[in-house]
Amino acid sequence: MVKKHLIALDLDGTLLKDNKTISQKTKTVIEKAREQGHEVMIATGRPYRSSEMYYRELKLTTPIVNFNGAFVHHPRNKQWGIRHSPLDIKIAKEIVEASQDFNSYNVIAEVLDDVYLHYHDEKLLDIFNLGNPQVTTGDLREFLNASPTSMLIHTDEAHVKQVNKHLSDVHAEVIHHRNWAEPFHIIEIVKAGLSKAVGLQHACDYLQIPKERVIAFGDEDNDLEMLEFAGYGVAMGNGIDQVKTIANEVTLSNEEDGIAVYLNDLLQLKAI
């Protein structure tokens, strides 16, 4: 009998090619893995509204991790419940207040699928409009009326260190923050103690799969905890050095079907 594995997939730079599509080869291998009894799930920093299309495209039947672990739910099973761990609204407003001193271009708060922008910004709206969220623009100290799932501070390169230092000095106990990859100088903030690994643990408990049989793929620093958690932590060939150092193995890049090649080999799927 096949020992059931849980395959956890980051989206951008991992499952998705650079043009934001899933290759046919990768789809074929994932389908074959599921046919053989393995479970497949998505674990992403994206909100659900901009990852739902990939969940449906792969016809998944598992929980999904969004906002790097701040929101975990099961789209096909309402009974599974919702694990939503937002930031304290008071802390969120203190961060907005402090960002005024850092020449920040903008502060964005997301409350699940609602988006709040401190300043109107067409370029940012293009990024955040995926999935047609309810968008509110205006001073977050006034307009933000619910605890945010995640916050983003958009600043310039010169101020990133300064903002990070302030967040660590003032809010280290209550928030977790990390920087987005180039070309954006964006600092992302979620509640302390959250990561994709926290979401994976919920899924493992539900599916009764030990973490030794979790195969996780990632490329960026928001994947570090997940790759450490998994029995098989796999870095993409295009991943950052830190991810490759922490991973058990490195596969090919997202443009070279790294996930498909690795799974086909490890699980002996004979799909490609």
Image: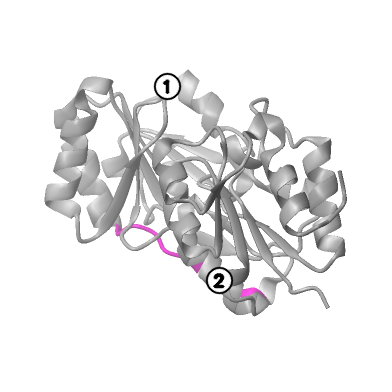
Q: Nearer the viewer, residue 264 or 199?
A: 264
Residue 64 lies, with reference to residue 255, above or below; the image says below
Give the side of residue 35 with respect to residue 256, left or right: right
Is residue 82 on the magenta stretch?
Answer: yes
Callout 2 secondary element: helix
Label 1 sits on residue = 183
- Please identify the quarter of the rendering in which residue 188 is found: top left
The 10 Å Cα crowd at callout 2, few under 14, some 14 to 19, many 20 or more, is some
**x, y percentage for residue 184?**
40, 25
**x, y percentage for residue 86?**
39, 59
Q: Kindly identify which numbered label has been placed on residue 38.
A: none
**x, y percentage for residue 267?**
76, 59
Give the side of residue 42 with respect to residue 140, left or right: right
Label 2 or label 1, whichever comes before in sequence order = 1
Q: Are marks 2 and 1 in contact (CB under 8 Å)?
A: no
- Look at the image and tell me in which quarter the C terminus lies: top right
Residue 148 lies, with reference to residue 137, above or below; the image says below
Look at label 1 and name its amino acid: Pro
Residue 182 lies, with reference to residue 65, above or below; the image says above
Is residue 175 on the magenta stretch?
Answer: no
Alpha carbons under labels 2 and 1: distance apart: 34 Å
Label 2 sits on residue = 211
Task: Tell me if I can see residue 62 in this picture.
Answer: yes
**Mark 2 vs mark 1: in front:** 2
**x, y percentage for residue 16?**
66, 36
Give the side of residue 150 with respect to residue 100, left or right: right
Look at label 2 and name its amino acid: Lys
Q: Please report the bounds of the magenta region as a residue range.
A: 80-88
Q: Nearer the viewer, residue 131 or 17?
A: 17
